[in-house]
C-alpha cells in the first residue's frame, strides 16, 4: 500500500513500467504519461487499437452473453498483474 501522500500504483503498473519511464501523479495514482511520443502514439492507435487503463476510476464490470463469461474470465486471469 502506498504511504500517505505518495501516489498509488495501478494494477497494470508492472506492464506500464516495462514500456516507459515517464510517470506522473494523476488523481492520486502514479500514471504513465507517455510511451513513444504523442504523434507516434496517436498514429499507432488510429491504425490499431488503444488501451486506456481505467482502474483508477473505480470498479469495472464485464457483462457477457450466456456461455461467454467463463471464456472471458479465463482470458482476464491470464493478464499480467
Image (spheres, helix red, strand yellow):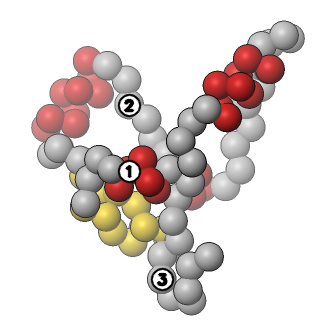
Q: Residue at x 38, y 50 (%)?
A: 16
Residue 54 seen = no
Where residue 65 appears, x then y in whole percent?
A: 80, 13
Residue 49 seen = yes
Quadrant placement of the N terminus: bottom right
Residue 24 falls in image quadrant: bottom left
Q: How much space separates mark 3 and mark 1, taking CA atoms?
A: 18 Å
Q: Which residue is mark 2?
A: 50
Relative vertical location of residue 26 with respect to residue 43 in this rendering, above or below: below
Relative vertical location of residue 23 with respect to residue 74 in this rendering, above or below: below
Query: Which of the two marks, 1 or 2, is nearer to us in this view?
Result: 1
Q: How much space separates mark 3 and mark 2, taking CA atoms?
A: 28 Å
Q: Residue at x 22, y 33 (%)?
A: 42
Where residue 62 appears, x then y in whole percent?
A: 73, 31
Relative vertical location of residue 26 with respect to residue 66 in this rendering, above or below: below
Which numbered tag is attached to residue 16?
1
Amino acid at each position: 500500500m502506498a504511504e500517505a501522500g505518495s501516489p498509488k500504483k495501478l494494477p497494470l503498473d508492472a506492464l506500464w513500467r516495462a514500456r516507459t519511464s515517464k510517470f506522473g501523479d494523476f488523481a492520486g495514482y502514479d500514471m504513465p504519461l507517455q510511451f513513444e511520443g504523442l504523434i507516434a502514439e496517436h498514429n499507432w492507435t488510429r491504425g490499431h487499437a488503444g488501451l486506456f487503463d481505467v482502474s483508477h476510476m473505480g470498479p469495472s464490470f464485464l457483462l457477457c452473453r450466456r456461455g461467454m463469461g467463463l471464456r472471458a474470465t479465463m482470458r482476464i486471469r491470464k493478464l499480467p498483474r
